[in-house]
């Protein structure tokens, strides 16, 4: 019999243990830089959620055997895990956990999405048997920001947007809709929400027209950050604008880091099929972290 209870601060050590276990073993990996409790707190802060609002403890016969959580976005729910203790990490048990967890009355209906590292065969098998569909495959890369950037910026080209820059924000929405139509339901309010959550939105213009953008965030207390989105209008690709976006934004990130103890890793993801982007980031100095797939399902 599988049951669940909402996590409390007393469970933080158990949650941290399983997050570390997942991060260090791709066979139970769930993607994203979720190396420990601090990492997950950084991720959740951008969604205005706490650990206790997100995680449930998976219980089997009065024994805590795992964790599972949800991040609520406007248009979908992101599933974290489940991560089970090693001796329970079997596809048949994962199926039972997924089925019973998503049947809880407090689970909202609609689109669910979960990221899984490709080596996590047991979770992938469970998702497939339950009818979840593979939506996309990603490569996760990272850059060690402790290594001083070798690039120099001769002239600043990017404009950092503020909430009052409504016209530029709307132009940025138009670029994102064209370049990344399937990533988000792009609108002005979404970008304003990003800014409220301490994201940085920078754009590059040509003849006063927004032709590219980069959206990033850095968590100084957690020693990591990520570039969530970077794109250039199709008409202006292969002209060096992507290089300018990446170089200048990374220079700004580097300047904002409080270099103390810590890895200081900058993460980004891309479609596995986007070999051009992969070569671009690799040549810039990014290293491959892992490959993962995103599975989706609609709950009615």
Image (tube, helix red, strand yellow):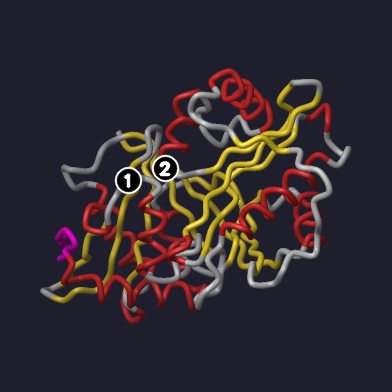
Q: Nearer the viewer, residue 176 or 106?
A: 176
x, y percentage for residue 225?
54, 58
Residue 299 placement: quadrant: top left
Q: CA distance from mark 1 to mark 2?
A: 8 Å
**Image-based side of 23 in relation to 175, left or right:** left
In the picture, the disc for residue 286 is none
Give the position of the C terminus as an image quadrant. Answer: top left
Q: Secondary structure at mark 1?
A: loop
Inspect the magenta stretch and tell me whether residue 2 lies in it.
yes
Give the residue pinned by disc 2: 197
Name the foreground residue: 231 vs 262. 262
Seen at 34% across and 66% down, the residue is 92
The answer to whether residue 92 is above or below residue 299 is below
In this image, 152 relative to 164: left or right? Answer: right
Instruction: Locate residue 271, reporting x and y percent.
Output: 66, 49
Extent of the magenta region: 1-8
Q: Is residue 242 left or right of residue 74?
A: right
Q: Position of residue 7 (x, y in %)?
A: 19, 62
Q: Nearer the viewer, residue 166 or 275?
A: 166
């Amino acid at each position: 019999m599988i049951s669940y209870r909402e996590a409390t601060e007393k469970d933080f050590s158990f949650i941290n243990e399983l997050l570390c276990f997942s991060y260090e073993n791709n066979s139970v990996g769930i993607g994203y830089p979720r190396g420990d409790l601090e990492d997950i707190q950084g991720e959740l802060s951008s969604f205005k959620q706490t650990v206790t609002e997100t995680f449930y403890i998976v219980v089997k016969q009065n024994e805590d055997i795992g964790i599972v959580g949800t991040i609520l976005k406007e248009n979908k729910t992101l599933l974290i895990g489940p991560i089970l203790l090693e001796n329970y990490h079997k596809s048949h048990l994962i199926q039972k956990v997924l089925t019973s967890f998503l049947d809880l009355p407090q689970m909202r209906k609609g689109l669910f999405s979960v990221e899984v590292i490709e080596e996590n065969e047991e979770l992938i098998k469970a998702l497939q048997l339950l009818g979840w569909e593979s939506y996309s495959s990603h490569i996760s890369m990272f850059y060690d920001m402790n290594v001083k950037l070798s690039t120099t910026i001769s002239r600043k080209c990017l404009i950092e947007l503020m909430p009052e820059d409504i016209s530029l924000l709307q132009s940025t929405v138009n670029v994102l809709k064209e370049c990344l139509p399937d990533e988000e339901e792009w609108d002005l309010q979404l970008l304003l929400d990003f800014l409220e959550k301490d994201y940085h939105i920078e754009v590059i213009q040509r003849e006063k027209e927004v032709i590219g953008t980069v959206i990033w965030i850095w968590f100084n207390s957690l020693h990591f950050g990520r570039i969530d989105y970077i794109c250039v209008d199709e008409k202006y690709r292969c002209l060096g604008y992507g290089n300018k976006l990446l170089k200048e934004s990374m220079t700004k990130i580097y300047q904002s880091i409080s270099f103390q103890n810590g890895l200081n890793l900058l993460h980004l993801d891309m479609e596995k099929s986007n070999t051009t982007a992969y070569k671009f980031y690799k040549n810039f100095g990014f290293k491959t972290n892992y490959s993962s797939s995103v599975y989706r399902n609609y709950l009615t």
